[in-house]
Image (cartoon, rainbow, N blue to C red):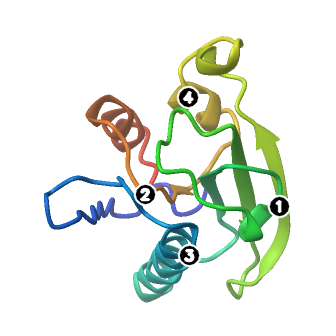
Amino acid sequence: MEGAGAEVVVEHEANDRGEIGLGRSDEELHWIKEKKLKNMLQNLKGGGVEMNERIVIPVLEEGGLEARLSEHFGRAPFFAVIDLGENGEVSNQKTVPNRSEHFGGTGHPPQRILQLKPSAVITFGMGPRGLGFFQRAQVAV
């Protein structure tokens, strides 16, 4: 997949006590999701990567890009799957349920996400095992 070798950039936003993801309002989480999506697009375009990318975002409900961002990657009930065209425009978006072992299915969330063949994942937070899993698979986080 194009962009599979994209540089992995991890951003963590913490509150004044150093806690990541705790006590954020829906508006703050939506703003963070939008900011990370814009930054990722700029990095991909600026790095000479052709578009036609697939981005996966953990969300709380169906609704694609309009859905509220989930603070916990692995326990998100849904994942927004966003396909981008050659010019970075959204060419398709859908929401898929989290069918990992956390929701009565099988496999760990990163394994399930890799089946969707993403080139990038946008998330508020992720544990070190999940992050390492995506880094080894050359999926930008």
Dividing the picture into quadrants, the one containing residue 136 is top left
Q: Which residue is mark 3?
A: 27
Residue type of the residue flagged with mark 2: Phe
Distance from the alpha carbon under mark 4 to that under mark 1 = 20 Å
Distance from the alpha carbon under mark 2 to that under mark 4 = 15 Å
Q: Between tags 4 and 1, which lies in front?
A: 1
Is the residue marked by circle 2 packed among few (<14), some (14-19), or many (20+) residues within 10 Å?
many
Distance from the alpha carbon under mark 2 to that under mark 3 = 13 Å
N-terminal label among 2 and 1: 1
Q: Which residue is mark 1?
A: 63
Q: Between tags 2 and 4, which lies in front?
A: 2
Distance from the alpha carbon under mark 4 to that under mark 3 = 25 Å
Compare residues 111 and 128 and report the one nearer the observer.
128
> Relative to residue 66, is residue 119 depicted above or below?
above
N-terminal label among 1 and 3: 3
Compare residues 46 and 36 and report the one nearer the observer.
36
Disc 2 element: loop
Residue type of the residue flagged with mark 3: Glu
Q: Between tags 4 and 3, which lies in front?
A: 3
Q: Is residue 128 left or right of residue 48?
A: left
Is the residue marked by circle 4 packed among few (<14), some (14-19), or many (20+) residues within 10 Å?
many
Distance from the alpha carbon under mark 2 to that under mark 1 = 18 Å
Which residue is found at the position 59% from the left and 59% from the top? Answer: 69
**At which x and y percent is residue 16?**
15, 67
Q: Which residue is mark 2?
A: 124
Which residue is found at the position 48% from the left and 50% from the top? Answer: 71
